[in-house]
Image (tube, helix red, strand yellow):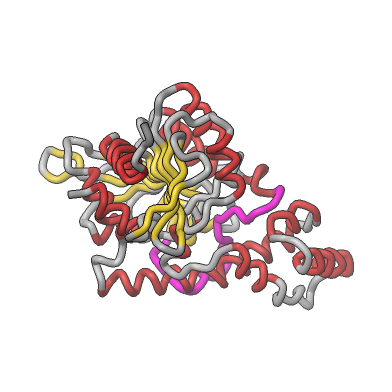
Amino acid sequence: MSVDPRKSLLELAQECVSRTPVIILGSGASAAHGIPGMPKLKAHLETIACPSTAEELEVTKWDEFQSKLTTTDLETALDEVRLPESLTALVVESTWDYLAPFDHQVFERAVLDHNLFPLTKLFQHLFNSTRREIHVVTPNYDRIAEYAADVGKLEHYTGFNYGHIRSRAVTGTPRIHVGNSVSRTVNIWKVHGSFDWFRDGDGIVFGLPVSNSRPPHVMPVIVTPGIEKYRLTHDEPFHFIKSAADLALKTADAYLCIGYGFNDTHLQTTLVERCREKDVPLVLLTKSISPAAKAFLESGKCGKYLAIEESPNGCRIFSKEFPAGEEIAGSPTWQLGEFLKLVIS
């Protein structure tokens, strides 16, 4: 007997959300709000001049790096051209200067429109229970998850204490209480850093308020693509954040991946182990399923999955019942807002 693809979609989608999934946000979740991805960042870095104070070796390396960018992607270029520390810092600062203003524009829109984020609706739905915390894991630098929690009147926690100049929370997990109850909190584990994290000259990492300009004399704490990310993520605050993200992923009862391309081995290893050991449903919503995501889903390591991508007439789903994909005409269910209309009554 043939399986109805609409029924299959609905059942697995509802099961995933009912299990209060760990939410994994990829670059597609940011792109939906106008934040450029790696291709546009790469194009921007091609325009950055080497500092006039650079030494001859640094100029040569920067020229080599920019030449490599014309023929390959940003991560490959940073892997193959080992930049000196000064030029790695230039990449980090240039990345922040280019991308952070887009994040600030999202913040300004959110101030005026508290219905801006479908993610807010998802958070609020997941808290329609006795649960006091949910987990988001993301390699994104932007603060969309934080803004989505804020406009939903929820607390968020990223590993830092509360305040305007936020120190790292190294002696425990701070929680806001309302009366005798812990306030509902979205834990947001940002494994590659955040636009509001900075390191001073003494190496101390702290958080600052939302801004569209970089404070002087401090370095953004973001991990750019390339070989350096594997070294830097062993330092703090990344070691702590990665451990917290791993724990959330290891104990998840479901995964909801939004705009995630499955291109980050930091997250994949733990996710694959959990999917192989337990009957944990995984749902992926994305405009276009990446080759890495397709390879993961086709590997058989995830026993219960649903991937939804854009198609001309609605969406295309992939699952164990439909490994080659099945078109479903109608609403673009690959978008989070449309997906939620399906699964949240």
Q: Which of 83 and 119 is in front in this view?
A: 119
Q: Nearer the viewer, residue 297 or 255?
A: 297
**Quick check: 217 above or below 79?**
below
Q: Is residue 48 left or right of residue 53?
A: left
Task: Please identify the quarter of the rendering in which residue 93 is found.
Answer: bottom right
Task: Please identify the quarter of the rendering in which residue 166 is found.
Answer: bottom left
Q: Residue at x 67, y 72 (%)?
A: 43
Q: Nearer the viewer, residue 152 or 54?
A: 152
Q: Residue furthest front?
A: 1
Q: Is residue 209 magenta?
A: yes
Q: Residue at x 38, y 35 (%)?
A: 2
Magenta residues, dominant SS class: loop
Q: Residue at x 87, y 67 (%)?
A: 60
Point out the stretch of residues depicted in magenta.
208-227
Q: Which residue is drawn at 32% across and 42% down?
A: 13
**Quick check: 43 above or below 185?**
below
Q: Does the magenta stretch include residue 91?
A: no
Q: Nearer the viewer, residue 335 or 6?
A: 6
Q: In this view, does 18 lie to the left or right of 221?
A: left
**Quick check: 278 above or below 338?**
above
Q: Is residue 82 left or right of residue 1?
A: right
Q: Position of residue 151 (x, y in %)?
A: 25, 61
Q: In which quarter of the image is the N terminus?
A: top left
Q: Position of residue 254 (x, y in %)?
A: 37, 35
| Count of residue discs | 0
Instruction: Examine the rendering and report whether any part of residue 288 can be seen.
Output: yes
Q: Where is residue 136 in the image (x, y as percent from the top left)?
A: 39, 45
Q: In this view, does 115 lie to the left or right of 58?
A: left
Q: Residue furthest top?
A: 277
Instruction: Examine the rendering and report whether any part of residue 134 can be seen.
Output: no
